[in-house]
Amino acid sequence: MMLVTSGAVAFGKQRLRHEILLSQSVRQALHSGQNQLKEMAIPVLEARACAAAGQSGLMALYEAMFTQYSICAAQILVTNLDFHDEQKRRNLNGTLHELLRMNIVPIVNTNDAVVPPAEPNSDLQGVISVKDNDSLAARLAVEMKTDLLIVLSDVEGLFDSPPGSDDAKLIDIFYPGDQQSVTFGTKSRVGMGGMEAKVKAALWALQGGTSVVIANGTHPKVSGHVITDIVEGKKVGTFFSEVKPAGPTVEQQGEMARSGGRMLATLEPEQRAEIIYHLADLLTDQRDEILLANKKDMEEAEGRLAAPLLKRLSLSTSKLNSLAIGLRQIAASSQDSVGRVLRRTRIAKNLELEQVTVPIGVLLVIFESRPDCLPQVAALAIASGNGLLLKGGKEATHSNRILHLLAQEALSIHGVKEAIQLVNTREEVEDLCRLDKMIDLIIPRGSSQLVRDIQKAAKGIPVMGHSEGICHMYVDSEASVDKITRLVRDSKCEYPAACNALETLLIHRDLLRTPLFDQIIDMLRVEQVKIHAGPKFASYLTFSPSEVKSLRTEYGDLELCIEVVDSVQEAIDHIHKYGSSHTDVIVTENEETAEFFLQHVDSACVFWNASTRFSDGYRFGLGAEVGISTSRIHARGPVGLEGLLTTKWLLRGQDHVVSDFSEHGSLKYLHENLPVPQRNTN
Amino acid sequence: MMLVTSGAVAFGKQRLRHEILLSQSVRQALHSGQNQLKEMAIPVLEARACAAAGQSGLMALYEAMFTQYSICAAQILVTNLDFHDEQKRRNLNGTLHELLRMNIVPIVNTNDAVVPPAEPNSDLQGVISVKDNDSLAARLAVEMKTDLLIVLSDVEGLFDSPPGSDDAKLIDIFYPGDQQSVTFGTKSRVGMGGMEAKVKAALWALQGGTSVVIANGTHPKVSGHVITDIVEGKKVGTFFSEVKPAGPTVEQQGEMARSGGRMLATLEPEQRAEIIYHLADLLTDQRDEILLANKKDMEEAEGRLAAPLLKRLSLSTSKLNSLAIGLRQIAASSQDSVGRVLRRTRIAKNLELEQVTVPIGVLLVIFESRPDCLPQVAALAIASGNGLLLKGGKEATHSNRILHLLAQEALSIHGVKEAIQLVNTREEVEDLCRLDKMIDLIIPRGSSQLVRDIQKAAKGIPVMGHSEGICHMYVDSEASVDKITRLVRDSKCEYPAACNALETLLIHRDLLRTPLFDQIIDMLRVEQVKIHAGPKFASYLTFSPSEVKSLRTEYGDLELCIEVVDSVQEAIDHIHKYGSSHTDVIVTENEETAEFFLQHVDSACVFWNASTRFSDGYRFGLGAEVGISTSRIHARGPVGLEGLLTTKWLLRGQDHVVSDFSEHGSLKYLHENLPVPQRNTN
């Protein structure tokens, strides 16, 4: 690690200003008020004098800061000549290597006191000179064959047009060949050398074999530690690279998904269905190729992934067959999605308003190891006319690639191949979650940890998904003996890893020490469910199971928390306090109690005498499931295709203006509801 | 500003470790490998020696850092005795005052080298001693009569139970009387003195007359500058205060709005309507009191607010009357909102699913100077059964207070007074936008700048509102001469400050230099609309108006951008590139072109031969308007009461479990759509 630092001149300017004031005559000092110090006119200071005065203070600051970490720093002052004179260059090189060998951080600066003042705008025809720190750093990076040169500025990086103009976009990766596509704006506010000089220095360093990142050092975007972020490969600033990757950038992919999606949305519903049917056929027709690609993934993952993950990663003929069946169902249900009229109003004579369903726009679907997610999500996006960016797990690379190719093949029968894009660029998931101008909705498909991470990372883009499923079942004092064990077993044991599995059983106090209670416990023992006792439940027992750490736990396994409540109201309060508003159930024979519970529990799904596991798009009869949402806006609970749609309002008039409807205008609002074509009811 | 600093011991430990290694025999050094330094066992270092060794390094660091800002620092080392001995105390006091007078920052630390080592857990019965920096700072703050003592730690502040436990909440303001409600967790990881010691020191300082804030110095939450945030009164850490404010905290208000809202939601629709009718009556009955309060606001604002803002702030009898009329409309339309059945499905015999509308939960409505917003928003919240937190502009304090009291009076006729809360605590708007556990939806009502600010500040809470209304009108080559000027005038001139006013006029190239074109320009001249030329338009003219700075501008005034396009497709592309997806219009007589435009423009509202100004909830016939949303999920375009509702799924079974529906189970899914009660059509 070497450091090229600015700041000596600025540091020195402050110091010299102070000294000048102190050296003024006593008379002046006596006459000056308290705030005079700030207001006094300060003579223009010579930059070289400032640099000399500031250098020691600057070094003292670095010294003190590095000392905190027991790191030793060394000062190196260079001039242009040190690079041109072969002997001097070798000396410098040797000194720096010696320092680095001893884990000492060289702090390098131009020896401003002895060089002519910098002239930023006169350049020696592209020959790099050590007139600013950017050039110095570039020269040093090449001389020392560094791995990476990081140029920190007060702007985010390199933009394709002056920042602030209509279409200015930060360039993520800059290739020397693309240089023409950039127009430079005004200089950076701090230090010498605007962006143009920085880019020139960067390109020079790149030619010399050093990769370069230009980034904002003052407002680090990701974690607050810009250097760490860059070294970890996060998408920060502009990366200068010699090697242009084969594919498009993620921004280009976003554009393609946007325009492809718009074309998809204007197709006839039958055409969208055709694409999905074709994709279903391809899944079975191209089975061998798909399984071959999947085999590659499996082989590479062998030994590196745990057994359950391997199982999720693997595809089989039967998996592909059922995928194809699922896709055909989506195709069938897609006929009635986009362009459905929801509401029609006659606002005035010849002025009719229509609310119709339209796609949301561009979806980003992030899925973990399961490659079978890809065709399913693709079919949902096609059915709803949305553009789609897919980001799959690295372990499924080969499988995802072929499945994506098949999706594009299916799309191309109606010329909308580009509506679905598979993101393979260096962007991490968190990077994608910040592209708020490109993406309208993020759908994470995977563990609740994934959902939580993405909800945290998404900046200004809505995320659809449930981060937790802490489902409750309340067994009322009037519950039927026959039903309870059946319901508890199904809810907890049928598939404990599901988000709609039971996590907390609330039992009415009156049921404690009854045969019914023993029956539940016996069943749980037989099913090998580990019981955790809530604090109240524990207090009722002489020997209780281990007490829960938190009543707000999603076990996702054969574990169950049992707590005692005194009434249906206490059960409701408990659910509101500790639940995740996913699915909550009451078991009772008393209809009044049941209705009270159904009305008062504020969750996405509230059931009476039914298993929590019914909380599912397919079981609800919504057709294809997009996911289960615990969000309170847009879609809530199991989400079908409708969750991927929004609406727009179409108004058809003749030459209607609102001023005609004013108090003394010629027209009155009619607001007649007009009949809407009835929805296809299966 | 005085600084009490930790770090000398830690600083010294590192230095001494290093020195010990260096002082070992040469033989050892020769035998040690390169990484030996880190691995070698280090003898236990004596804290006092460390302190002595570290003090100079620590001071050098502060010195170097303060020098950057031309600030002089001074070192003060004190012991317990310096406070007990009257003479010493007076000396210390005098020295510090002298330094402060000279704008020098005293950096104070215990003279660790000469005091006995600190014993954190033995305390002299509540008597504060200078054994840790928290106590030292408290003592110093009282001795020097400081305004504020800021105690920086590595935790957020004081929690009511050990951080990490189920219900741990950060205490915003701590009053000495509340001490019992806090249980302390383990010590802070850095430095002496856990939170208990910090709180003791804070209370001691508070008794001595100094306010105290305990906050996290390592991960500043708001702007990244914790001290600035605190001094600016932002909601950071825990504030210790003697004076308990009369009202509840915002967290308590959130709880009240939540539970009050839940009660409101379970009322009968007629009861909710009754409340709103009653509020409408109160607005006219209590007119004099309301106008009196408003007069106070107006008097205080006089001279401080611009004329248009004053106009918005002022209430009048006629304003109140029309408010009351609006409220009665909301009451009438509220009958059919909460609890409406949207979908019914028979999943199996005796297993019926129902999707019903329910309130979203707790809304936060932020409005600027207009006090008439309050009753309107209150009525919308009541109609939709939502809890409501209101944050109004400071300039309308008196008006808001009385209007809120009237809303609560109306609510109390059905015992749900607490459902609507007016936030009057020290929280800034940005503070409120971070309360994601309390608030389900934020609705900013005001300028687009307000909306943008809030969208930026909201962390994990959805915001409903349009940040920009850049509306376009495309005049096709087949547009009718008679209609155009009427439509353009109404869209641009009728109320230019509205978000649905026209901002960019796109004209087909064929219309240039036609009489129609001249007619439009003449009309704009007459209406005194300032014209900005798009780059293409400018290139067609010999003498063009000033060219636009950006095609993406919301003027909100009598200014209009004119640009030329070659085709309807180019118009659509322009709208997609520069528009804000609010409202866009085509003027043409060609139905085919019109339908192409209606289908392809991806905006919330797309019109044919109608003014942009129709984009409005009332004009659309949606009844009360919540706002206009340019978001792509939940509600889009003009939003009526429905935008304040979400849904929940109710499933009523007998003892249904999903395992009965498995491949070999006894039951099959029916998924029959059942009839839904038809919607009240006016």
Image: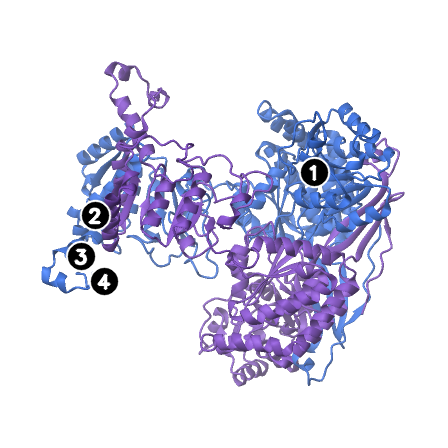
Chain colours: A purple, B blue
**x then y, percent, for residue A626:** 66, 65
Q: Quadrant location of the C terminus of chain A? A: bottom right
Which residue was labeled with disc 2? B54
Residue B586 vertical position relative to residue A458 in the rendered view, above or below: above
Q: Quadrant of residue B345?
A: bottom right
Q: Which of marks 2 and 3 is nearer the N terminus?
A: 3
The reply, left or right, for residue A428 in relation to residue B320 is left
- Say if mark 2 contacts mark 4, CB within 8 Å: no
Q: SS class of the residue under badge 3?
A: loop
- Please determine if labels 2 and 3 lie on a single subunit: yes
- Say if mark 2 contacts mark 3, CB within 8 Å: no
Q: Distance between the residues labelled 3 and 4?
A: 21 Å
Q: What residue type is labelled 4?
A: Asn
Q: How far apart are marks 2 and 4 (CA)?
A: 25 Å
Q: Earlier in the sequence, mark 2 or mark 4?
A: 4
Q: Which of marks 2 and 1 is nearer the N terminus?
A: 2
Q: What residue type is labelled 1?
A: Cys
Instruction: Return the residue nearer the eye: B115 or A408.
Output: A408
Instruction: Return the residue nearer the eye: B298 or B550.
Output: B550
**x then y, percent, for residue B194:** 32, 54
Tag on residue B499?
Answer: 1
How dense is the environment of label 4, judged by Cα within 10 Å: few (below 14), some, or many (20 and up)? few
Which residue was labeled with disc 4? B35
Let me know if residue B603 appears in the view.
yes
**x then y, percent, for residue A68:** 27, 49
Q: How far apart are marks 3 and 1 (CA)?
A: 69 Å
Q: Nearer the viewer, mark 3 or mark 1?
A: 1
